[in-house]
Image (cartoon, rainbow, N blue to C red):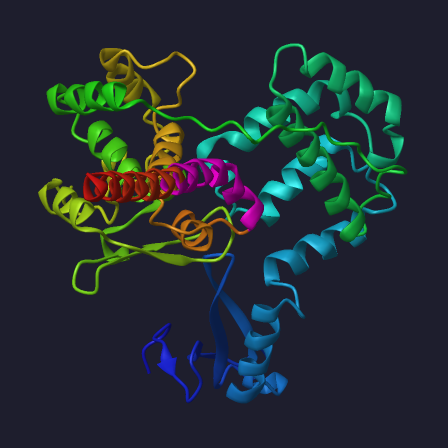
């Protein structure tokens, strides 16, 4: 019997290998389960046949772990370690940071470096403190320091990470959490970027003249589909259904995978886009891996087109896409919400005024047409009298 060979069972995600009994040394089945959690494929040992493990019990264990009723083996090990060291180890924010990284390796913020950047601001202030040692005054001081050089949105993300780490400590029994609720800064998300027809033409011209293999294509795709930068970085060729005409967006900002239409302009764009051999990504980075940044290349095109300095090359084009649809008067707010994959309709309402202006123009046109008709009637009556 070959060792380590996987043998299927009647249950999906449940298999076994032949191993040796821990006491007798005789062959016995060792059951394993595989499942996905937060987008990450996990393979874990479920138990041995000599320990009363069966395919059915392994399947129930798998279901409980998928639903979150039972922690993963990695989470179990973390909790067991926490229990052993609870009495002797002080769970400072530095140690919580390391533990959180090990417990949540699937989060996309690690690859982009976002969390590391946010943590750098927390480390100096709170790295040596346990959560319950942090006071409201400490947080106020950090907020006042950051707001001098950072945007309200950035400060909010940094404070959210502090709250996450403190809640992580409390939820896993590592330390008492904060004794107060962190007050988050108010963020104005109403900024809507747009381009005039003249600026849009200059941008399209700059894209055509640029020789970067991906920057211009990503900018056009943002214009054609309204996709976010991160969604394009994560986009794989398998997510593009050329036959049915859809693009599957994996792990969007709303958290639930969605589909958006693949329009003809985007279809032609992707068909002409060069595929990188052995890479599943549409816009891969080095060595075919997932890219995380293209700022320098898109800013070069932005500069060549003479766009405003505060215009964001990719996210701004998502706004242009939405603004064009809203101002056309042909797309209702619900449809626009679905196309933009907004979880909250309030996010889409920022474009409502554009649609309102179109409706006003249409209403004014109706009034003008009626007035023209009335004028013609008056003219005909006047001519008839003569």
Measured as percent of width and height from the top left, residue 294 is found at 32, 26
Image quadrant holding the C terminus, namely top left
Left or right of 191 on screen, residue 93: right
The correct choice, above or below, for 332 with respect to 324 in the image is: below
| Magenta region | 344-363
Q: Is residue 327 visible?
A: yes
Q: Is residue 284 visible?
A: no
The correct choice, above or below, for 356 with respect to 133 in the image is: below
How many marks on residues? 0
| Residue sitting at x 36%, y 42% | 362
Residue 128 placement: quadrant: top right
| Residue sitting at x 64%, y 43% | 100
Image quadrant holding the N terminus, namely bottom left
Measured as percent of width and height from the top left, residue 31 is found at 50, 78
**Nearer to me, 197 or 108:** 197
Measured as percent of width and height from the top left, residue 341 is found at 44, 50
Residue 186 placement: quadrant: top right
Is residue 49 magenta-colored?
A: no
Residue 209 placement: quadrant: top left
Measured as percent of width and height from the top left, residue 252 is found at 45, 49
| Residue sitting at x 65%, y 21% | 121
Left or right of 182 on screen, residue 190: left
Q: Residue furthest front?
A: 386
The correct choice, above or below, for 27 with respect to 229 in the image is: below
Is residue 358 magenta-colored?
A: yes
Q: How would you classify the magenta stretch by its main secondary structure?
A: helix
């Amino acid at each position: 019997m070959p060792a380590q060979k996987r043998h299927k069972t009647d249950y999906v995600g449940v298999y076994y290998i032949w191993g040796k009994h821990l006491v007798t040394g005789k062959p016995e089945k060792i059951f394993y389960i595989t499942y996905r959690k937060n987008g990450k494929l996990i393979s874990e040992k479920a138990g041995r046949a000599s320990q009363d493990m069966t395919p059915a019990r392994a399947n129930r264990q798998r279901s409980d772990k998928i639903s979150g009723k039972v922690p993963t083996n990695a989470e179990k090990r973390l909790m067991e370690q926490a229990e052993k060291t609870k009495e002797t180890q002080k769970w400072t924010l530095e140690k919580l940071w390391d533990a959180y990284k090990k417990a949540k390796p699937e989060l996309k913020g690690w690859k982009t470096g976002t969390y590391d950047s946010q943590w750098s601001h927390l480390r100096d202030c709170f790295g040596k403190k346990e959560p319950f040692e942090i006071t409201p005054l400490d947080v106020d001081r950090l907020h006042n320091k950051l707001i001098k050089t950072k945007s309200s949105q950035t400060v909010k993300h940094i404070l959210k990470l502090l709250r996450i780490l403190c809640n992580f400590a409390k939820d896993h029994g590592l330390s008492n959490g904060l004794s107060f609720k962190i007050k988050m800064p108010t963020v104005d998300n109403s900024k809507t970027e747009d381009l005039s027809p003249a600026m849009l033409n200059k941008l399209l011209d700059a894209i055509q003249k640029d020789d970067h293999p991906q920057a211009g294509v990503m900018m056009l795709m943002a214009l054609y589909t309204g996709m976010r930068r991160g969604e394009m970085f994560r986009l794989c060729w398998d997510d593009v259904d050329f036959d049915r005409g859809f693009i599957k967006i994996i792990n969007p900002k709303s958290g639930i995978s969605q589909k958006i239409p693949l329009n003809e302009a985007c279809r032609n764009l992707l068909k002409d886009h060069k595929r990188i051999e052995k890479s599943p990504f549409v816009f891969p980075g080095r060595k075919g891996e997932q890219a995380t940044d293209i700022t320098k290349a898109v800013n070069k095109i932005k500069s060549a087109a003479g766009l405003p300095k505060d215009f964001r090359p990719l996210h701004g084009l998502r706004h242009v896409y939405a603004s064009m649809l809203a101002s056309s008067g042909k797309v209702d707010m619900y449809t626009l919400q679905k196309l933009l994959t907004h979880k909250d309709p309030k996010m889409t309402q920022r474009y409502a005024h554009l649609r309102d202006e179109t409706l006003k123009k249409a209403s004014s046109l109706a009034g003008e047409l009626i007035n023209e008709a009335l004028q013609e009637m008056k003219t005909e009556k006047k001519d008839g009298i003569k």
